[in-house]
Image (cartoon, grey):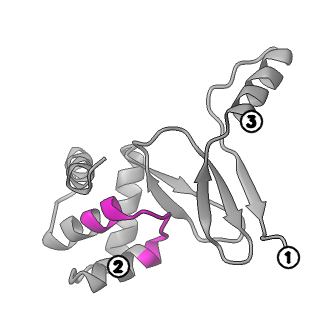
Amino acid sequence: MEIETRAEAFEAALRRAGVRITRQRAALLRVLAGAEDHPDATQLHQRAMAAGAGVSLATVYRTLSALEAQGVIQKLEFEGEPARFEPADGSHHDHMIDVETGEVMEFVNERIERLQAEIATEMGYEIVRHRLELYVRRRR
């Protein structure tokens, strides 16, 4: 999804939540909409400040909380890392987290998806939703 379209969707979600859209908050939404990684609140705050938005860290947290409650972003909580965020408008994917650098990488693997569905079926269940996180380190 294009950055402006995503930022507008974030803004609409905040309005539905009764949150006022200030200039600072609008700048933060553009930063979040343009993020190609999985930033945490502090990183979003730093990026918004670098973009000229005099937004407080408390406003960043309140905004992220409202967006998550509206279902337009997902909060990702990886072991030993601060919570990170990503838009909820993408297709399903899993994550690999480099335990040495903290880098988060998205991946999709059809064999894993099939195997999970097979296991659930064999046990008499169907998958409603799932998250797979692989904690990795580069081979030396």
Instruction: Give above or below for 139 relative to 118.
Output: below
Task: Identify the residue under disc 2.
Answer: 47
Task: Tell me which residue sits at (40%, 47%) in the image.
Answer: 69
Q: Quadrant of the C terminus?
A: bottom right
- Residue 57 makes an appearance in the image: no
Which amino acid type is marked by label 1?
Arg
Q: Amino acid at mark 2?
A: Arg
Q: Nearer the viewer, residue 57 or 2?
A: 2
CA gap, disc 1 and disc 3:
26 Å
Mark with earlier residue (2, 1): 2
Is mark 1 in CB contact (under 8 Å) with mark 3?
A: no
Label placed on residue 112 = 3
Q: Residue at x 39, y 61 (%)?
A: 64
**Residue at the disc numbered 1:** 140
| 117 horizontally vs 39: left or right | right
Residue at 44 percent of width and 77 percent of height: 43
Q: Disc number at residue 36? A: none
Residue at 76% in and 61% down: 135
Give the spatial CA distance, label 2 vs label 3. Answer: 35 Å
Circle 1 crowding by C-alpha within 10 Å: few under 14, some 14–19, many from 20: few
Instruction: Determine the secondary structure under disc 2.
Output: helix
For the residue pair 62 and 53, the one nearer the viewer reads as: 53
How many tags in the picture? 3
Q: Amino acid at mark 3?
A: Ile
Query: Which comes before the other along the chain, label 1 or label 3?
Result: 3
Q: From the viewer's perspective, is the residue at label 2 or at label 1 nearer? A: 1
